[in-house]
Image (cartoon, rainbow, N blue to C red):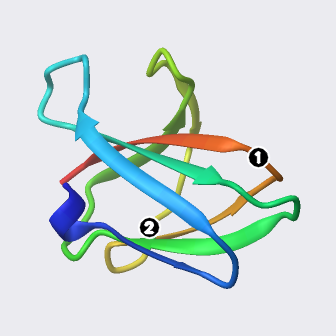
Amino acid sequence: LAQILAVNALHKADAVGKGAEAQDGSHISRVYNSTCKTVDFKLAFGRAVRLVQEVNLAEEPVAALKSTRGTVALSAEPKQILTLRVAF
């Protein structure tokens, strides 16, 4: 997943990825805003995305998100970790 994930932000946001615990072929991406400011950023997955949803750390659904051409626009509060389930 690291090869297809790009983070675009004005400030620091770090992203990591792994396979979902559900073993349904989806991937989990976690983004951490390490700053003391709210950060708006985009995640670009490099290919078409079938499903993107925000999940909690236990990978339970929180909210559905929209993607446009494999890119998702997000906002992270200071020191916030965002967890996303992504299916291609």
- Residue under label 2, please give it: 67
Circle count = 2
Identify the residue shown where x is 44% and y is 67%. Answer: 67
Q: Is 63 displayed left or right of 61 in the figure?
A: right
Q: Check the image and report above or below for 26 versus 79.
A: above
Q: Is 15 displayed left or right of 38 in the figure?
A: left
Q: Is 54 displayed left or right of 85 in the figure?
A: right
Q: Check the image and report above or below for 15 versus 79.
A: below
Q: Nearer the viewer, residue 41 or 48?
A: 41
Identify the residue shown where x is 23% and y is 17%. Answer: 22
Secondary structure type for disc 1: loop
Residue 73 image-quadrant placement: bottom right
On the image, the x and y values in percent for residue 6 come to: 36, 74
Query: The residue under label 1 is which amino acid type?
Result: Lys
Mark seen at residue 5: none
Q: Is residue 27 visible?
A: no
Query: The residue under label 2 is which amino acid type?
Result: Ser
Q: Check the image and report above or below for 14 versus 70.
A: above
> Mark 2 vs mark 1: which is more N-terminal?
2
Secondary structure type for disc 2: loop
Mark seen at residue 79: 1
Residue 50 image-quadrant placement: bottom left
On the image, the x and y values in percent for residue 47 come to: 19, 73
Q: CA distance from mark 2 to mark 1?
A: 24 Å
Identify the residue shown where x is 68% and y is 84%. Answer: 10
Q: Is residue 12 visible?
A: yes
Identify the residue shown where x is 22% and y is 60%. Answer: 2
